[in-house]
Amino acid sequence: MSETEKPLLIKRYASRRLYNTESSDYVTLEDIAGFIRAGREVQIVDLKTGDDLTRQYLLQIVAEHESRGENVLPLDVLTDLVRSYTAQAQSVVPQFLAMSFDMLREGPNKLAAINPMMAQMSKMPGFDAMQRQQQAFMEQMMVGWQKIPGFAEGEAEAEASTDSADEDLSAIRRQLAALEAKLSKMGK
């Protein structure tokens, strides 16, 4: 595995300072957000306990951006996220969000290719509400993503790679089938 493929290891000291193990210097949350925007995977661990704190710090980065008025997540989506922390919905929501972001990364052309599958899924109870929420979420995300340097170039590269596109489409179909099965179980 090359150096850039491995997650950038950030260690949190007892003083709560964050230490970049590659550059041997202290970093801020904004520095970490910059690494992620540049396409780098990051792992943040507590130096003393070894606990993985990545999720906690990523949520903190999102919260700080939202509190500064950089609203990417619509209020309805945030409300639904809070509601999703129930035992019944918790198993479906993370996969749904992951699939949504996968589709966002893969570009709008791949979304059009799965429309026939969406027709079948639309018959499931509650699908309309989920689709409206996903659409609002994706519209907000696309506004933010268009500002990211290299986003349009990455979209063009994805279109040029048809072999990987077919594999990606197959993966999306499998994920949608799994989601459909879980939603069917919830509706019963």
Image (cartoon, helix red, strand yellow):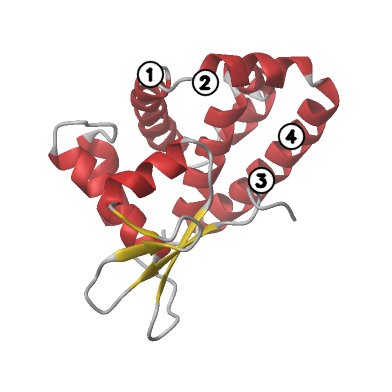
- Residue drawn at x 77%, y 15% is 160
Vertical side of 51 occupied by 34: above or below: above
Farthest residue to the bottom: give it.
Answer: 49
- Residue drawn at x 62%, y 27% is 106
Give neighbour class at mark 3: few <14, some 14-19, many 20+ (Cα, 10 Å): some
Which residue position holds label 1?
147
Element class at badge 4: helix
Q: CA distance from mark 2 to mark 3?
A: 24 Å
The answer to the question of whether label 4 and label 2 lie on touching residues, with beta carbons closer than 8 A, is no
Which one is closest to the eye, mark 4 or mark 2?
2
Q: Nearer the viewer, residue 157 or 181?
A: 157
Q: Amino acid at mark 2?
A: Phe
Element class at badge 2: helix
The answer to the question of whether label 1 and label 3 lie on touching residues, with beta carbons closer than 8 A, is no
Which residue position holds label 4?
168
Give neighbour class at mark 2: few <14, some 14-19, many 20+ (Cα, 10 Å): few
Asked if one can make out residue 85 in the rendered structure from this viewpoint, the answer is no
Element class at badge 1: loop
The quarter of the displayed image where residue 66 is located = top left
Q: Amino acid at mark 4?
A: Asp
- Residue drawn at x 35%, y 54% is 58
Nearest to N terminus: mark 4 or mark 3: 4
Nearest to N terminus: mark 2 or mark 3: 2
Q: CA distance from mark 4 to mark 2?
A: 18 Å
Which residue position holds label 2?
151
- Residue 70 in the figure: left or right of residue 128: left
